[in-house]
Image: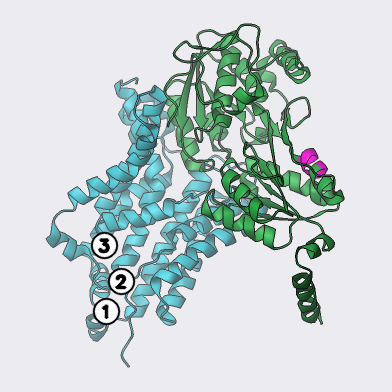
Chain colours: A cyan, B green
Amino acid sequence: MILDISFIGILIGSIMASSVPLILAASGELITERSGVLNLGVEGMMIIGAISGFALMVITDNLFLAIIGSMLSGVIISLIFGFLTQSLLTNHVATGLALTIFGIGLSAMLGKNFVGIPGKDFPILFESLKESIPFFGPILFGHSIILYFAFVLPFLTSYFLKKTKLGLIVRAVGDSPTSASNQGINVILVRYCCILYGGSMCGLAGAYLSLIYTPQWIENMTAGRGWIALALVVFATWSPIKVLIGALIFGGITIMQLHMQAVGLRIPVQFLSALPYLMTIIVLVVISRDSRKIKLNTPTSLAKIFYKEK
Amino acid sequence: MYKNFLRYLTSVIFLLGFSASANAEFKVGFVYVGPTGDHGWTYQHHEGRNAVEAAGIKTTYVESVPEGADAERVIRQLAQSGHDLIFTTSFGYMDPTNKVAKEFPNVKFEHATGYKREHSNVSTYSARFYEGRTLLGHIAGKMTKTNTIGYIASFPIPEVIRGINAMTLAAQKVNPNIKTKIVWVFTWYDPGKEAEAAQALIDQGADIIMQHTDSTAPVQTAEKAGVWSFGQASDMQRFAPKSILTSIIDDWAPYYVERAIAARDGTWGQQDTWHGLNEGMVAMAPYNSAMGSDLVKEVEQLQKDLASGKAHSFTGPIYDQKGKLLVAEGKVADDGMLAGMSVYVKGVEGDIPK
């Protein structure tokens, strides 16, 4: 392996790019789960975001509209989930699974006419700086605006949950909806908002794939990333910063194992392929050993249906 | 009215048992491993199905069927619902196809890229994609500046290994310094992962990207990075107009139409088909003018020779990685050896995943 410093910079840059959809989707789902709602429809919302973003890009030729549209589509599809689980009090797990299956099917149907259309170049920021500064250039510069947003998002999420009143309300609703309701908080409304926010982030994560990462539409192009995002939230014990770490480790080892293969290291390839999953779990379990913190972060009422007493 | 008719029909079928299926409308079923919109492997099979439909034969298809237990269920479902001929279009459907074939002796099965024909109602068919890979290898050997060819491989099955070997042998012939770097992604279809694999190979110095996976992500990555690439299964030129030198195109349509008509007319018999450039099951997309007219002419000649049998992708002497002679000088590998190929030839780096 060419282990010079500028090569490592390029490597880190591509690791960051690959972890963006995981960070976005997991950060959104984290808020949803902290409010006590388990939405297993992440994969479905991502794929809907991917096709909506791509379709809007083709129709309007405007990337800004495409990004906003993908988030809106995530909001709309998560609204279905919200209505079912919050207003009709259906089971979270079953409804979420149905949402994923529905999303994959619907996206394939919507996308029929968009297969085989090449995507557009997404604007890259500070491209000249990327080339001119060794090591730090490819890490800090030459990315899309969405990537910068994704890397700020976990910190914003953390701040929101810990330091703001609204964050406190979300946590209260997730921990003890009955007490929160008795305090005069509209539990259902808060949960609706968290579900819709989660939907918008998943939609954006999907659009990142179809507009920026692999600019094209093909069926099922999220290829299970929604499920990995879901697992990340749990293994990161509902901590936004650990979600970021987990996503980077997952992306990092995925890319590293490809490089190890390309170099021809004599390690069984199946082991290398399993490595991202293994390492992410191990690292997150190790850094999340503090049981007091886990108790503090885990939404106690996760996936429990809330009946408002009349 | 319609419902009553259906009821009547089902009871008739029930009473007459299997003989009824012969009287019912002739139907052909297709099982796909990916979505019809993958613009690669499944897309081309779907084009074949469209041709069967155009020939006036009714067809149905099931897409994105995972290899394994699900496949068996889907194949059985098609057999039960009155399909007379079923094409199962992925290597991993081999055992499920044979298993279901045993239960439905009156239904005919066609399995793509496999080698098991355990019952008289199972045929196998495949294309000699390796002939296309030989052409890619020749082009790659001439076009590379870094002498490094990046190869994105899916699963360690003979089909994929044969492609790697054919490409490497052809590239070595025109450029003895060539190195083939291989990345196994263990998926036929994951655009994100395929793009990452392509990027890793480019970062490791490959200036030619070749894929044995089905999405267009690798050629797009190559286009962005400014290196050469080759399309897989269908003409992917418009996804990477500058980067793509040519694509290997799978053309299943004539075979599908021929077999469907044979099955309908009762002339279908078990066979093992392996067609290549000669029969047109493997075709090449137009060559990129960036190759230069001399190289294009050279490759076109080689294409003709491969088709006519004057040239063969696996002409001896061929050695394995340890230097053991596989094919003697002046001989060519026979089909049995090609079908079961499970070792790399000399010059390929790394081990085959076991």
The answer, for residue B83, to whether it is visible in the render is: yes
Q: Are marks 2 and 1 in contact (CB under 8 Å)?
A: yes
**Residue B38: x, y in percent?**
61, 45
Instruction: Name the amino acid, label 1.
Output: Pro
Residue in the picture at 36% in, 60% down? A28
Residue in the picture at 51% in, 55% down? A47
**Residue B322: x, y in percent?**
44, 13
The answer, for residue A59, to whether it is visible in the render is: no
Residue ID for mark 2: A36
Magenta residues, dominant SS class: helix
Q: Residues within 10 Å of mark 1 (few under 14, many from 20)?
A: many
Residue ID for mark 1: A177
**Numbered-mark total:** 3
Query: Is the residue B101 above or below the residue A75 in the image?
Result: above
Quick one: quadrant of the C terminus of chain B?
top left
Q: Secondary structure at mark 1?
A: helix
Instruction: Name the amino acid, label 3.
Output: Phe
Q: Could you tell me how far apart the alpha carbons at marks 2 and 1 are, in whole angstroms?
A: 8 Å
User: In this view of the protein, which residue sits in the foreground, A230 or A54?
Assistant: A230
Q: Secondary structure at mark 3?
A: helix
Q: Quadrant of residue B20?
A: bottom right
Q: Chain of mark 2?
A: A
Left/right of residue B354 with respect to residue B63 in the rendered view: left
Q: Which residues are drawn in magenta?
A: B253-258
Q: Could you tell me how far apart the alpha carbons at marks 3 and 1 are, in whole angstroms?
A: 19 Å
